[in-house]
Image: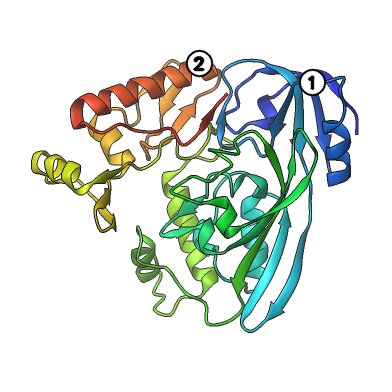
Amino acid sequence: MEILKNISLKPYNTFGIDVNAKHFVSVSSEEELITVLKNNNYPKKFILGGGSNMLLTKDIDALVIQVNLKGISILENKNGHALIKANAGENWHQFVLWTLENDFGGIENLSLIPGNVGSAPIQNIGAYGVELKDVFHSCRAIHIDTQEIKTFSLEDCRFGYRNSIFKTSHKGQYIITSLSLKLTTSAHQLHTEYGAIQNTLNEKGISKPSIQDISKAVISIRQSKLPDPDKIGNSGSFFKNPVITDVEFNNFISKHPEAPHYKVSENQVKIPAGWLIEQAGFKGKRFGDAGVHKNQALVLVNHGNATGKEILNLANTIISTVKERFGITLEQEVNII
């Protein structure tokens, strides 16, 4: 464990933004993490996971701590369920593939989401009708200031749509070191009703899909819509899909009857942000090296040498344009640093 100076963070964020860390260290165990947190020579500390849900807009004048804890284990396996623990530094998609290889069901719809396991609870990752909270058991975390180790239950985390206490009341206070999920070992509950999953299965002639089939369908859909961060810098979905009240929806749909929408509760409706952005004319547009992806307007991209500020300016332009045209305010899903 070596503390390095003036390190470029370009390889450590999926947007590929070239900013510098004043100091940088990678930790591979809770013991190393606690040691670094106790090091008073570096009073300012910045926690870095997979770098997939952030937009870096400036150099980091702090000790950047890369959480690189590895390991997956089966804690319990009985009564049709398995309790699986994954450490925070594991790549999320590789973890999903591991569960499928072992025929553990529950997160197949979350295939190919970028980032590491430790970031998953922070924003309650979700896709194609499934959210992390649906299978979440607990997570283990270390308090940055006191180094106290705490286990957070499902109830503790107060999960919401792309939200948790780690983004609200406990923001910046804890580092998640591991995650435990309760997955099925038999009688898997399949979710094929959202998006194009069922159509993709039909095209492949699959009438009785397995969890592995659903994962492959999700991967196929995502690859057709979403860019590979290794080829073009991006952070996946940059904006949340807005959820509006029935009153707001009735006003909106009267003016835009063609708009896709999804009922999410008795008095709330979700509108796809990608549709709003595309209708506002941004899909596929490029502003210098900052742009909107040609296949999915929800994704902002770095065509090579865009700065974080340039991408943020584009995001703000999209927000103001959508607000003016549709009366709906988009929220960023990505953390702005």
Give the alpha-carbon distance from disc 2 to disc 1, as whole Å.
26 Å
Name which residue lies at 9% across and 38% down: 255
At numbered mark 1, what does the secondary structure look like: helix, strand or loop?
loop
Count neighbours of disc 2 (C-alpha within 10 A) and say few if under 14, some if 14 to 19, many if 20 or more. some
Residue of label 2: 309
Measured as percent of width and height from the top left, residue 240 is found at 40, 40
Is residue 289 at all visible to an observer of this figure?
no
Amino acid type, mark 2: Lys
Amino acid under disc 1: Pro
Q: Are marks 2 and 1 in contact (CB under 8 Å)?
A: no
The residue sitting at 67% across, 36% down in the picture is 173
Residue matched to label 1: 43
Q: At numbered mark 2, what does the secondary structure look like: helix, strand or loop?
A: helix
Name the residue nearer the viewer: 111 or 267: 267
The quadrant where residue 186 appears: bottom right
The residue drawn where x is 79% and y is 47% is: 69
Image location (x, y in percent) of residue 26? 81, 34
Left or right of 139, for residue 56: left
The answer to whether residue 284 is seen in the rendering is yes
